[in-house]
Image (tube, rainbow, N blue to C red):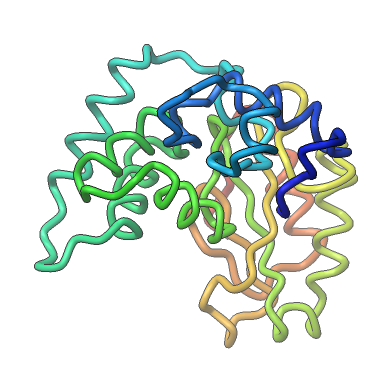
Amino acid sequence: MGKGSAGGQSPNAGMACVIVDVLYSFICDCPVRRGSWDCWAKSGCAMIVPLPTIGRRQRGLTESNDMLRDRARRAIASQKQPTVTVLSSLHSAHDALGYLPNAAIEEVAAYTEATINDVWGVATFYTNFRFTPPAEHSVEVCWGPTCHILGAARIKKDCLEALDLSDEGNTSDGKVSLKYNTCLGACSQAPVVSIDHRLYGRITPERMQKHVERLRDGARASPG
């Protein structure tokens, strides 16, 4: 995002004010710390991160911030590989929590001695990370070339209709989260979906419909 002119108001000024006011310590290293659009526009010290959920209270959050922070810290510290990076630490925290709350971002930054700006930069670059609490069940539709050719568009369309969604996201009851995945790594079994982190290959619209119905009813997807 380019820096706005000091003399006028950016078209994104409203968004910038909200994010800077709420997340100022995360995105601005300026010693003035005025926390306003004026500060960023004039001095360029703040990085505006266009994520609507950052810095806001997460809906559906059942754990306290201290509990999330402790779980993230333990997950990050438990990495066994010889080289620990920001990306590997983000993966560890995400695997443990199911998403990346603000506390996890802070813990990754502290552990890797990176700036919070840098951690956000890595986290938001990869589409597999999420920043809101996951639903009770997860459904991922592979959108890779092979799956696309072999019927993923129909699977996606039927999933959206069955879940009453217009695009990927969580159902209104919080039971199912739908996401498109660029590749689930099982091209020979295309089209492929992942349901609660279990892969289902050569999926048909009929089988997918049954899986989704079971999830909406609160049951786990069947093995077939």
Q: Is residue 197 above or below residue 161?
A: below
Q: Report the quarter where the C terminus lies.
A: bottom right
> Which residue is at the front of the view, 118 or 8?
8
Q: Point out residue 10 in the picture as x, y percentages from the top left corner.
A: 84, 38
Q: How many marks?
A: 0
Residue with the most extreme front position: 7
Quarter holding residue 107: top left
Residue 175 at what x, y percent from top left?
65, 28
Q: Image point 35% across, 59% down: which residue?
A: 87
In the rendered image, which quarter is residue 214 located in? top right
Residue visible at 23% across and 39% down? 110
* Front one among 108 and 143: 108
Q: Nearer the viewer, residue 128 or 179?
A: 128
Q: Is residue 147 left or right of residue 109?
A: right
Above or below for 137 versus 71: below
Image x and y of residue 137, in percent = 57, 37
Q: Residue 11 location, x and y as percent?
A: 88, 38
Residue displayed at 57% across by 52% down? 195
